[in-house]
Image (tube, helix red, strand yellow):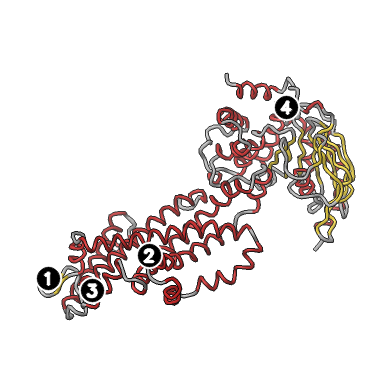
Amino acid sequence: MLNLINSDKRWVRWATFAAGLLLGLVIWEIVGWSFNPAFMAPFIGGDGHPGAGTRLVAFFGDEEFIDSFASSARLFATGFAIAVVTAIPFGILLARLTWLRISLESYILVLYVTPMVALIPFILSIMGFGFWPKVLVVVLFAFFPILYNTLEGARSVKPELLEVARSFRTSELAIWRDVLIPYTLPFALTGVRQALGRALVGMIAAEFFLSTSGLGEELMVASRNFNMASVLATIILVTVIGVILMRLAQSLEQRFAAWRGIEQ
Amino acid sequence: MSQAASNLVHTVSGTGTSADDPSSAPTRIAISGAGKKYGELQVFKDINLTFGNGEIVTVVGPSGCGKTTLLRCIDGLIPLSEGEVKIEGSPINGPREGVAMVFQHFGLFPWKTVYQNVAYGLKLARHPAAEIKEKVPYFINLVGLSGFETAFPYQLSGGMQQRCGLARALAMEPHVLLMDEPFAAVDAQTREILQFELLKIWELRPLTMVFVTHSIEEAVLMGHRVVVLKGRPSGVHEVIDVDLPAPRDRGTLGHPRFTEVREHVWSTLMDEVRAAEFEV
């Protein structure tokens, strides 16, 4: 019996995984039913106890909710894309220009550890309401993990490879294209993966504290109305999307790190 | 047959010389008064050497004598502190066309396949795609890597990686090939195989080769002349003509003259090697 549980056969692993998930849902269901629906909602639910999972399914037919979702997705995608396309080149540039790195290093470290939520009132007072201040919040949340990882990666480029490139009379542009970017990409993608979770937090925070909109607004309204099923349904949605995006980034990371010969 | 292919066969056969081929010049590389300092440390000084066309010159010396540094200066990767290097008459102030280097650390791009690594220099120099398609497989075949075109460096043994490094350099069809202890990082048996294969390739395409090594045996086997670097700062202690019959092959190793030269170089360097070993 113990051998079977510890076996690394595929179906055993899947069955264990499914059993863990199922057990969690059962506990959730029991807890959900034993509280007042204003404080806790079960997963499936029923009479007097609306379920979060059931509500989530219903959301897909709710036009207003779909609009909110689209609005959040637009905010997230814009902010995240800006963070990726600025942080990666900037990270490589910092590794390439020692004086720039040394002069900015302390600021980068400070901003990397700064709780970005604390900057939101500041952004509000400077930029006011609207779409772009919210984008800035998402960018700030996502930018630094990507920058930090890219910089560390680009700094570890083997000097031998740069020497080879020089010996073949490679231009600076081609050194970026042929050496720095391919070498740094797996490191940068580690940063991208870390940044995904942070950017989702940034998205919700921006929607809470700046002009309320999107899933943040849905969450806010639902919790004011003690509608726990909707609150939890929205949280599940954001979480599931986060997990999917992270898995995607992880497989990209593995794809671009294949040349390192790990796990082949 | 395409233009590129006919050019290729032309160069490979090594018979004709085209008008702009500088191989008619007697001296390919001239080093005069060369010195290199790192801060206060003078690595070598006052080195004067010339390398002829299609000549293999090996450079030996104890560790830390600056033989690899000298090679990097010839390639233009690092500047000399004193003196100058001229290749085909023009002074070197950076890596130039017609000179290719093979590195001790192979220096293959790990994210590129064998094919892509060999094509690297040609692509950079913007050779036409048709020409690249002709040349890359030719040089992969020349170094014996056919069938491994799509392999990545981490999937290859050290010897195979250096074959790839050699093909990458040869594909540029250089007049000058700089070899920086190319076989130091491969195992002893592979090293012997590669030495003889390199000699065979040189028979096919005789180019000027500066070959840095710490193996006295390798220096005498490969070199038409052996340059012995010695001293602190080091300088040219001796240049030995190795008048061994061509082509050189395994038989060369049993030749009395081979043993003679090897012993001569060994006794020249022994004192200094001892001193270097016990230096803290």
What quarter of the picture does the N terminus of chain B occupy? top right
Q: Nearer the viewer, residue A120 or B187?
A: A120
Q: Earlier in the sequence, mark 2 or mark 1?
A: 1
Q: Nearer the viewer, mark 2 or mark 1?
A: 2
Characterize the local packing of mark 4: few (<14), some (14-19) or many (20 or more) Cα atoms within 10 angstroms: some
Distance (Cα) linking label 4 and label 2: 71 Å
Q: Nearer the viewer, mark 3 or mark 2?
A: 2
Distance (Cα) linking label 4 and label 3: 83 Å
Asked if disc 4 and disc 2 are in contact, CB closer than 8 Å, the reply is no
* Residue at image location 24% in from the left, 76% down from the top: A223
Q: Quadrant of residue B50?
A: top right
Q: Nearer the viewer, mark 4 or mark 1?
A: 1
Characterize the local packing of mark 3: few (<14), some (14-19) or many (20 or more) Cα atoms within 10 angstroms: some
Q: Amino acid at mark 3?
A: Ala
Q: Which residue is mark 2?
A: A131
Residue A34's x, y, as percent? 16, 79
**Chain to which the residue tagged by mark 4 belongs:** B
Q: Earlier in the sequence, mark 3 or mark 2?
A: 2
Tell if the residue under mark 4 belongs to the same chain as the one under mark 1.
Answer: no
Residue B191's x, y, as percent? 68, 40
Residue A259's x, y, as percent? 51, 48
Number of the label disc, if any, that sits on residue A222: 3
**Chain to which the residue tagged by mark 2 belongs:** A
Number of the label disc, if any, that sits on residue A46: 1
